Amino acid sequence: MGEPSLTNCPIFGDQLTPLLPDKVGDAGRTAADNRQFVNGYLWVLRAGAHWRDQPERYGKWKTVRRRF
């Protein structure tokens, strides 16, 4: 069984995207960053781990923590 993710979740685009900050003029990269951020944040919540223990696949832990 794989780890839960928002990568293919239809609710992400419809309901969560408007709540996340946007990067003007860089729409393609924004969606990937937002999904990566939310997945990284959810990983920390589920694992009960420190930000520094977050896997690299979610990006830099400092970036996820700062956006939170």
Image: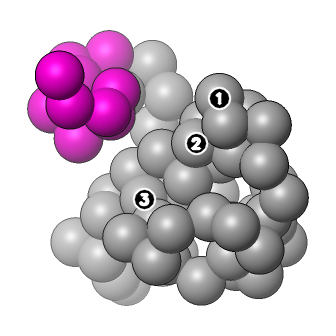
Quarter in which the C terminus is drawn: bottom right
The residue tagged with tag 3: helix, strand or loop? helix
The residue under label 3 is: 36
The residue tagged with tag 1: helix, strand or loop? helix
User: Which residue does the image show at 17% across and 22% down from the upper left?
Assistant: 1
Look at the image and say whether residue 55 sits in the magenta stretch: no
The residue under label 2 is: 43
Task: Provide the residue span drawn in magenta.
Answer: 1-11
Left or right placement of residue 28 versus residue 46 in this view: left
Q: Residues within 10 Å of mark 2 (few under 14, many from 20)?
A: some
What is the quadrant of residue 27 in the picture?
Answer: bottom left
Q: CA distance from mark 1 to mark 2?
A: 5 Å
Q: Evaluate whether residue 21 shows in this view.
A: yes
Left or right placement of residue 46 versus residue 50 in this view: left
**Which numbered dot is residue 46?**
1
Q: What's the magenta bit mostly, secondary-structure-wise?
A: loop
Q: Residues within 10 Å of mark 1 (few under 14, many from 20)?
A: few
Marks 3 and 2, the one that precedes in the sequence: 3
Label pair 1/2, CB-CB below 8 angstroms: yes
Q: CA distance from mark 3 to mark 1?
A: 15 Å
The image shows residue 18 at horizontal and vertical percentages of 52, 36
User: Which residue does the image show at 77% across and 74% down from the upper left?
Assistant: 52
The image shows residue 17 at horizontal and vertical percentages of 46, 38
User: Which residue does the image show at 78% across and 49% down from the upper left?
Assistant: 49
Residue type at mark 3: give it.
Answer: Gln
